[in-house]
Amino acid sequence: MLLRPVRDREDDAQAVRFVADAALLAPPSACAPPPGHAPLPAPAVRRPHHPRHLARTDPGGCWLAEDATGRPVGVVLSARREGTWGLSLLAVLPEARGRGVGGALLKRALEYGRGCLRGIALVPPHPVAARVCRRAGLELHPATRLTGKVSTASLPAPDGAVAEGGPGDRDLMDSVDRRLRGGAHGPDHEELPRHARLLVTDDFAGSGYCYLSAGSGGPEGPEVRVELLGATSRRLATRLLTAALGAAGEGRRVRIEGLTAEQQWALDVGLVAGLEPDTAGWVGLRGMRPPSPYVPSAAFP
């Protein structure tokens, strides 16, 4: 087995997607991942821009494992953001599991984040994934997800102004990030607006932001994801999430992942909008308490 950095090239991005899809779409008998295998939800890893962005910003944290023929069999993507390390993806092909591939990849990612005091990852609902991340030093906080079709008629009007965001809001978002997670997302706030709708709020009471992105299509159309929502208060977070669900549109399918017990405000908004809660893995944290009010992104936690 050979480990090499993921490069900012389309063929490497395709290799990452190949491994991630094969790991996630394995038949049920092969779904229980071995040590070191911790895939993310499919919509997060299929974004074509995601591997190339992290390969540019964090080449030391992104690695591919290849077999003797040069075929990719595993991948890890991780990032450092101002002292906060994030695990974005760890996946191994079903036929390569149990050979130490995942452990070797995770070791490289952990070495890359060694100088970071804080760490964060969305951990999928697999027992082995939880065990691996716990051994990596992450505290596991049970998470809830909200899914379903939005009923905009049930939503109250936001209690303040919410505007379309843009490049001029980078400082606002970095400031919110530092307050909540100890490190700004930085370049991620340059990448995400190219592929997701950005909403911001900013007034005398504080500030916040939220991204809305469309996932894979289905018989009922693309699923809208609410991700990377951060605010300086629950009131502003509630305002943003209410506006985001309203912007998604009546009857649109929506998914919100990674809600820890500290995000009751998000559950309240989602339940009013007709979304259904379900348990869904954990939010793994190191050196920090669960950020709140905050909704992480699987790809950019």
Image (cartoon, rainbow, N blue to C red):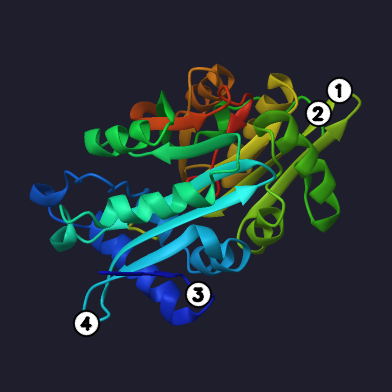
The residue under label 4 is which amino acid type? Thr
* Amino acid beneath label 2: Gly
Residue 12 in which image quadrant: bottom left
258 displayed left or right of 27: right
Identify the secondary structure beneath mark 1: loop
Q: Earlier in the sequence, mark 4 or mark 1?
A: 4
Q: Is residue 28 above or below residue 72?
A: above
Callout in the foreground (3, 1): 3
In contact (CB < 8 Å): disc 2 and disc 1 = yes
Q: CA distance from mark 4 to mark 2?
A: 58 Å
Q: In the figure, residue 248 lies in which quadrant?
A: top right
Label placed on residue 160: 2
Mark 3, secondary structure of its residue: loop
Query: Who comes first in sequence, dot 4 or dot 3?
Result: 3
> Can you tell which quarter of the image residue 209 is in?
top right
Tag 2–tag 3 contact (CB < 8 Å)? no
Cα separation between marks 2 and 1:
10 Å
Q: Mark 4 and mark 1: span between their CA atoms?
A: 58 Å
- Of callouts 2 and 3, the N-terminal one: 3
Q: Tell me the residue at 55%/65% (across/down).
A: 59
Where does residue 40 sit, x and y in percent of width and height?
A: 37, 48
Furthest-right residue in this view: 204
Q: Are marks 4 and 3 in contact (CB under 8 Å)?
A: no
Point 63% across, 37% down: residue:
229
User: Depth check: 18 or 65 in front?
Assistant: 65
Q: Which residue is mark 1?
A: 205
Tag 1: residue type?
Ala
Toward the viewer: 199 or 25?
25
Q: Nearer the viewer, mark 4 or mark 1?
A: 4
Q: Which residue is mark 3?
A: 7
Crowding at mark 4 (Cα within 10 Å: few <14, some 14-19, many 20+): few
